[in-house]
Image (tube, rainbow, N blue to C red):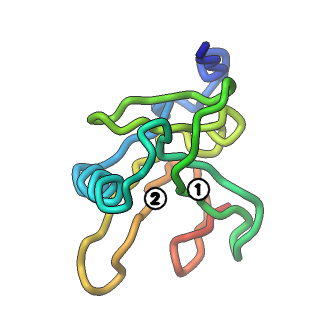
Amino acid sequence: MENKNIMSDLVLEPGTKKGVSLTPEAIREVKRIITDSHIDVNKGLRLGVQGGGCAGFTYMLDFDKPTDNDNVYDIEGIKVLVNPLHELYLAGTEVHFEPGLNNRGFIYRNPNANKTCGCGESFG
C-alpha cells in the first residue's frame, strides 16, 4: 500500500509538530484493548475529527482498516491511522490515557485547539 503524505507540503505554525503521538499510558491502554478485544491484526488505531460537539469538532478514536490515503504511523508497535484532511486539525496532538477512577479515558492534548469544551471531547 502506497502511503500518501501531504503533511510534507503543508506550512505549519513554527514549533508545531507534524503527526500525532501517544503517551506511555495511552500506548499501554491501546495494547490492552487490542489484546482483550481481539482486534483484527489488519486494523489500526484511527484518530480523527468530525464536525459537532459544543466547541465545533469532536475527536474520533476507533479501530479501522487503513485506506490508501491514510498517513500510517508505527508507535511502539501500534499502527496509527490518520486521514490527511484530519491531520490538519491533529498535527502535533498527543493522546494520553488517564487511568484513574475519576475522569478515566483518553485525553487529547491538541496544540491547534484554541477553545475546548468542559468535557474535553470537543474543540474549536
Q: Residue at x 28, y 49 (%)?
A: 27
Q: Residue at x 27, y 35 (%)?
A: 76
Q: Residue at x 65, y 31 (%)?
A: 67
- Name the one closer to the observer, 91 or 104: 104
Question: For this view, does 15 lie left or right of residue 69?
Answer: left
**x and y percentages locating residue 124 in the rendered image:** 68, 61
Above or below, 116 relative to 21: below
Confirm or deny contact between disc 2 and disc 1 (CB under 8 A): yes
Looking at the rendering, which quadrant does residue 100 occupy?
A: bottom left
Looking at the rendering, which quadrant does residue 13 occupy?
A: top right
**x and y percentages locating residue 24 in the rendered image:** 22, 50
Separation (CA) of disc 2 from disc 1: 10 Å
Q: Which residue is mark 1?
A: 113
- Name the one closer to the observer, 115 or 63: 63
**x and y percentages locating residue 116 in the rendered image:** 58, 69
Above or below, 81 relative to 24: above
Looking at the rendering, which quadrant does residue 103 occupy?
A: bottom left
Give the amino acid at mark 2: Tyr
Ranked by sequence position, the earlier of labels 2 and 1 is: 2
- Name the one closer to the observer, 86 or 36: 36
Give the amino acid at mark 1: Ala
Instruction: Label 2: state its secondary structure.
Output: strand
Q: Residue at x 61, y 23 (%)?
A: 7
Q: Which residue is mark 2?
A: 108
**x and y percentages locating residue 46 in the rendered image:** 54, 46
**Category of crowding for the residue at label 1, using alpha-carbon neighbours closer than 10 angstroms: few (below 14), some (14–19), many (at least 20):** some
Question: For this view, does 10 lie left or right of residue 45?
Answer: right
Quadrant where the image shows the N terminus? top right
Question: For this view, does 118 lie left or right of residue 103?
Answer: right
- View extreme (bottom): residue: 102
Q: Nearer the viewer, mark 2 or mark 1?
A: 2
